[in-house]
Amino acid sequence: ADAIDVGAIREEFPILQREFDGQQVVYLDNAATTQTPDPVVDAMSDYYRESNANVHRGIHHLSQEASEAYEAAHDRVAEFINADGREEVIFTKNTTEGENLLAYSWGLAELSPEDTVVLTEMEHHASLVTWQQIAKRTGASVEYIRVDETGRLDMDHAAELIDDDTAIVSAVHVSNTLGTVNPVSELTDLAHEHDALSFIDGAQAVPNRPVDVKEIDADFYAFSGHKMAGPTGIGVLYGKRDLLEDLNPYLYGGGMIRKVTFEDSTWGELPWKFEPGTPPIAEAVGLHAAVDWLEDIGMDRIETHEEELAAYAYDRLEAEEDVEIYGPEGGPDRGGLVSFNLEGVHAHDLTSIMNDHTIAVRAGDHCTQPLHDKLGVPASTRASFYVYNTREEIDKLVAALDDARQLFA
Ligand SMILES: Cc1ncc(COP(=O)(O)O)c(CN[C@@H]2CONC2=O)c1O
């Protein structure tokens, strides 16, 4: 596929023209959140201006329009990830809520002391802490698939850990710290060989590459709107329909019920059963527009663009003898981000220097503290890329290292 037209894309992001101290912003913090193109902002503004009403099919024109827009967003997302229709697409607040929905509605009900939850050492706190706490409450145990010295999963260790005691395997598709692209189909197959469920955290995958949940055969898959050129306040939990049919909700209220009496209640149809109360309607409209906008570029082309930028960043940083990079070398095993440290300079100081050059990167543990403990560093600096980033921006990042060396090293 031909390269994406970054110049044309940047025209749709006024925020990228912003300057601080006379320097144009260099936004390299996309793994935290991506910027929002005009068509997405316009779709949400138009909704509020012209179609705003509450959903659940109120008997008036505006509610009909709002309901249709909200339902169409479910259909569009289902198509985008190759789910079997809106029944398999639950709108949540974000990836974190999707993981908690599964942990509370399935984990609390199904896990017992005989069960094991298999995670990886590179899990984000959204899944690691969630499963760790649900395991404590149910008596289940938690085991972690090792990350090897290249930053990849040790799949021999995975095959050892995943056995007949395993109830669920929960793995990140692309690590938000290492950039590692994990073999999620293989992990899912291992889980299914032992009648265990497979949950995949796709927060750093769905925005950046083609994702086909049926090809992966994951039982559940979560991601966020704000990391894929969409708004904050909306995420998706995909689930296989037959599994969702058997799950009981853990959040109750209006819109999710079929019949309510003073004695008891019964639950509504999928996906509404898991969407109590007034949902993020404008955000759903925005997410729909974001999916259209991304597909217009092409997910294959986005994946190639990010892989090339990450490989370029990896090579440029690798050439600096006082820089330590975490995760695999550039190529198909690395998504669009690079975490690193500059010898003798704390990540927070480096990131502050970067900010002096109006370069936005992120310092910290990236919600993967156990992984940083394993790496033996308290924090790292992470540059993460999206469709509007260029090699020239990476050159600015590398050039700013010298300031940090002069000041701190
Ligand atoms: C792999 C992964 N899983 C789950 C989440 C949680 O997503 P929500 O915040 O939308 O629920 C994130 C967010 N990434 C964090 C957010 O900021 N910086 C990061 O790397 C993530 O990268």
Image: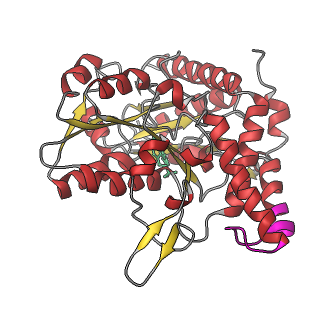
Provide residue 326's location: percent of width, then percent of height.
Answer: 39, 27
Picture colour scheme? secondary structure
The mark total stands at: 0
Against 315, is 286 above or below?
below
User: Residue shown at 60%/33% (left/top)?
Assistant: 397
Q: Where, quadrant-wise, is the N terminus in this rendering?
A: top right
| One can see residue 322 in this view | no
The quarter holding residue 220 reads top left
**Which is the main secondary structure of the residues drawn in magenta?**
loop
Q: Position of residue 77 (x, y in %)?
A: 65, 43
Against 81, is 125 above or below? below
Question: In the visual, does 291 lie left or right of 137?
Answer: right
In the rendered structure, the answer to whether residue 121 lies left or right of residue 396 reads left
Between 290 and 307, the residue placed more toward the observer is 290
| Residue 73 in view of the camera | yes
Closer to the camera in the image, 115 or 373 = 115
Residue 48 counted in the magenta span: yes
Residue 100 falls inside the magenta stretch? no
The span picked out in magenta is 46-60
Residue at x-position 31% and y-position 43%: 378
Residue 293, image x, y percentages: 77, 39
The answer to whether residue 109 is above or below residue 227 is below
Left of 237 or right of it: where is 355?
right
Q: Residue furthest bottom?
A: 262
**Of 133 and 213, which appears nearest the observer?**
213
Which residue is located at x 73 percent, y 62 percent?
A: 67
Q: Position of residue 49 (x, y in %)?
A: 85, 68
